[in-house]
Amino acid sequence: MTARLLDGEALAARIRVEVGERVARLHERGVTVGLGTILVGDDVPSARYVAMKQEDCAQVGMVSVHEHLPADVSQSELEKVIERFNADPAVDAFLVQVPLPAGLDEPAALLAVDPAKDVDGLHPVNLGLLVMGTPGPLPCTPAGIVELLRANHVPLEGRHVVIVGRGLTIGRPLALLMAMRPPRPNAAVTVVHTGVPDLAEHVRRGDVVVAAAGQAGLITADMVKPGAAVVGAGTSWSGRKLLSDVDEGVAEVAGWITPRLGGVGPMTRAMLLVNAVEAAERRA
C-alpha cells in the first residue's frame, strides 16, 4: 500500500480530549453537559452505535440520557418522548437513532426534535443555516470528513472534490460544506451518483473523492487519479463484515485513503460530542 492512512480513530481520540477539557470548564461553572439518545426497537447495529455514544459520553464527562422504546411503540408515544427531551434542561442535545421500525414516520420524528438540540445537525432549520453560512450545528459525518482531511494536510482550497452519493446524511450537506468560502474548504465540488453512466470519468477528475453511495467496492483503482485523497464514507454489510464503498486496491493509487474500519465512523461520533458541548456552551 502506498497511500497514507487517514486515521479517524487517532484524530477522534484527540477531539475527545479537547471536548473533555471544554466539558470540565463547564463543570467548573456548574454546568453539566447532557447528550440524549432515543432508541426504538432492537436493531443490533443501532443498539451498538448508541452504546458507543454512551461510552464516548463517559470518556469526556458528559451525562448520557437514554430512552429505549419497544419496536411496537406508537408514533404519538415516540413524539411524546421527543417532546420530553426537548423540554428537559438536563439534555443539551439529542438524537433519535435511525432507522426506525416499520410503521413509524421517521421524517415526522426527526422534525419533532428542537433544532437547538439537534445533535446530528440534520434538522431542516440547521441545514438551512448551513446553506446561509450561518453558525449552527453541522451535520456530523460531513464535518468529520472535513476535519479528517484538514488534520492530514490534504489540500482542499480550490481543489476538485468529487462526492459519489447524494444522501441527506453525507452527500448533500458535504457538498455545501466543501464549497463554502474560507475558513471553510472553498473547493470546487461535483456530486454524482450510481445512476450516472460515466461515473468513472467524473471520479477520475477528483483531487479528493468521497464515496458515500453504500455500494461495496464501487470505487476501484482505475477510477482514481494518482495521488488523490479517497474517503470511504459509504458502507454496507456482508453478513457481519462491514464493507467500504472503496475497493482495497485503491490504496495502491491514492495519496491518502481511509481504512475500512477506523476512518469516518469515529469522526462522526466525535463530531456528535462537539455539537453537544457547543449546545451546552450556548446554554451557559
Image (cartoon, rainbow, N blue to C red):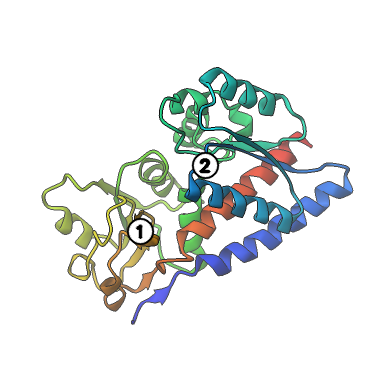
- Return the residue at label 1: 239
Toward the viewer: 217 or 277?
A: 217
In x, y percent, where is residue 257? Answer: 38, 69
* Residue 277 horizontal side relative to residue 119, left or right: right
Q: Residue at x 41, y 67 (%)?
A: 258
For residue 87, what is the image quadrant?
top right
Q: What residue type is labelled 1?
A: Gly
Q: Which residue is drawn at 49% across and 62% down?
A: 148
| Outermost residue toward the top in this view | 76
For residue 73, what is the image quadrant?
top right
* Residue 101 horizontal side relative to residue 119, left or right: left
| Outermost residue toward the left in this view | 197
Q: For residue 182, say whether it is visible.
A: no
Name the secondary structure under disc 2.
loop
Toward the viewer: 72 or 255?
A: 72
In x, y percent, where is residue 248? Answer: 30, 72
Please determine whether, in this image, residue 84 is positioned above or below residue 18.
above
